[in-house]
Image (spheres, rainbow, N blue to C red):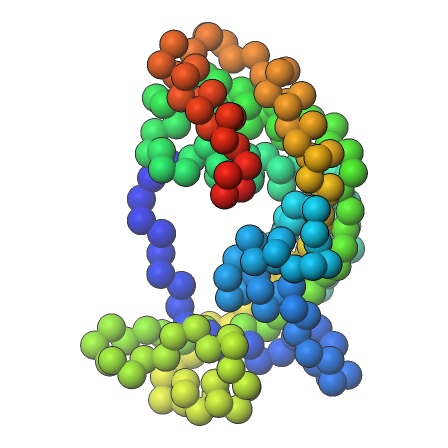
Amino acid sequence: MSGAAETPLPYIIVNHKNKAAGESIPKWVNCLLEEGIGEVENLAAYEGRYVFVSRNEGNNFNALTQWKEGFSPELDFPRLAAARIEARFLSGVSHPDHEYGAFFEALIRAASDAPWKGAVREDDFWLRRRYFSEDENNPDMPGNTAGQTPENAELQTANYPPARESWDFLILVTIEKSLFASQLDAVFRNTKPNPPPKRDQVNAANRVKDRFFDGF
């Protein structure tokens, strides 16, 4: 997996769950949008737990609602765990199959198939975002305005045509850190790559495993 990540378009939040009732965006959602999953894990509410967020985006609110209602921690957490494990092994690596050999594919398959226990669905939320076409030649083009009040954000983006709007659904799932670590250790033990990786590939995988939770 390689290639530069796309720069996200600037946007404003035009609607969100319970906005009509006067409720604000939860702190975990703001942390996720502004700083990422690591900042959510730093919240006192999730101390001692790893945080995972399942996301789905689109234009069909009813279909996204059905997806949300059908989400099951027991059935869907393995996919979330495998994706985060994959991201950890891909960090700083352009060609994982070359770096780790058959171990990489076998590991992701084992993580996806593992009977993970202890995942808890904590919360869910949805947003309606309006994205704006970016004008690279205009130095006043707004950046991500999610942290602003709707009134100020609307004023800042008033001169820029909307590119699109979409719904963004989020489901927050957590798991106790030591429980996740013990199950991950079992996944590592049960990973049986074929063909066996070369010595340098084994060493590369072991380096990641030995420091797996650094920056996880």
Q: Is residue 108 above or below residue 213?
A: above
Q: Is residue 189 above or below residue 46?
A: above
Q: Does residue 121 appear in the picture of this structure?
A: yes
The answer to which of 189 and 58 lies nearer the viewer is: 189
Q: Position of residue 68 (x, y in %)?
A: 73, 56
The answer to which of 139 and 133 lies nearer the viewer is: 139
Q: Residue at x 55, y 77 (%)?
A: 13
Q: Position of residue 141 (x, y in %)?
A: 32, 80
Q: Residue at x 62, y 37 (%)?
A: 81
Q: Position of residue 88 (x, y in %)?
A: 48, 37
Q: Is residue 71 above or below residue 191?
A: below
Q: Which of the 4 quarters of the picture holds residue 73?
A: top right
The quarter of the picture where the N terminus appears is top left
Residue, far left: 137
Q: Is residue 91 above or below residue 61?
A: above
Q: Which of the 4 quarters of the picture holds residue 98?
A: top left
The answer to which of 203 and 5 lies nearer the viewer is: 203
Q: Residue at x 70, y 52 (%)?
A: 47
Q: Residue at x 74, y 28 (%)?
A: 115
Q: Does residue 113 appear in the picture of this structure?
A: no
Q: How many marks?
A: 0
Q: Position of residue 93 (x, y in %)?
A: 36, 33
Q: Is residue 110 left or right of residue 159?
A: right
Q: Is residue 25 left or right of residue 115?
A: left
